[in-house]
Image (tube, rainbow, N blue to C red):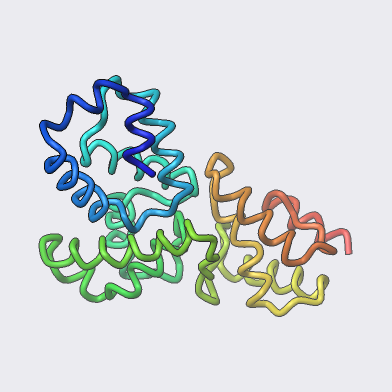
Amino acid sequence: MLFARFMVIYGHKFKSAFNSPKELVIAKREWSTSIGSYDEDVLVAALEMAKQTYSWMPSIAEFLQLLEKCQQSFGLPVAEQAYAEACRYASEPLRHPWSHAAVYHAGKQTGWFELRTLTQKQMWPSFRHVYKALCDRVLAGEELVMPVGQALPAPSSSELFDLVNSWAEQQGLAVEDAQTCLYYLHLVERNPLRQRLLQQAQTKHPDIQFPATLADLRQAIAAK
């Protein structure tokens, strides 16, 4: 599918990139190995971006960069940013408002102790492999759950726990469920994942009116 689209998009420029049918076969095999794990939706989005970015067919490295940019539109940080975040907050992973649940789970699976104590040369290959697998699951539609006890961003962890506990009691939800549903409040408003998580919570509990902000959460609790 990908090379057929490239041929349509780039025409004679695509054909001139390969000197022989054998070279084209080898190129297809290498491309398939490099991008085979990406979801079709991300590939299509990257193709559209390639049309607007390159007047010639992009290299594998260039296309992989486009794939990572498209991946970010799902709220997933690029692997390098995810690794830096995991290393920085490996000492207290349950107290940090993670940019995405995939970053937390990648850090957990790779090993918090190892991320704190070993070098980037030792840990980066393992982390990148784990994180990419988690990203593929997210892109396929899976919702990764944040750990129980994750604190929402606020001045006081104890205050936040009380807020979530009160809201959960009002809505007839388990505290763990409420924490997961309200996780979108961790994220800054410009983060595209915030609206997606809110929509997922609304789909899961269509009869509940979810607060748009932390201030709304306080007001909802105070009004009861």
Q: Nearer the viewer, residue 125 or 216?
A: 125
Farthest-out residue, front: 21
Q: Quadrant of residue 9?
A: top left
**Residue 94 pos. (x, y %):** 44, 71
**Residue 15 pos. (x, y %):** 22, 27
> Which quadrant is the N terminus positioned in?
top left
Using the image, determine if residue 58 lies above or below residue 78: above
Instruction: Left or right? Give the position of 195 relative to 28.
Output: right
Q: Nearer the viewer, residue 35 or 12?
A: 12
Q: Quadrant of residue 12?
A: top left
Identify which residue is drawn at 45% across, 41% down: 44
> Which quadrant is the C terminus positioned in?
bottom right
Using the image, determine if residue 202 lies above or below residue 107: above
Q: Quadrant of residue 54?
A: top left
Instruction: Left or right? Give the position of 142 relative to 37.
Output: right
Using the image, determine if residue 154 lies above or below residue 147: above
Identify which residue is drawn at 53% across, 70% down: 145
Q: Nearer the viewer, residue 219 or 119?
A: 119
Number of numbered discs on residues = 0
Q: Nearer the viewer, residue 166 or 46?
A: 46
**Residue 93 pos. (x, y %):** 39, 69
Farthest-out residue, right: 224
Instruction: Left or right? Give the position of 151 relative to 32.
Output: right
Identify which residue is drawn at 77% across, 66% down: 205
**Residue 159 pos. (x, y %):** 63, 67
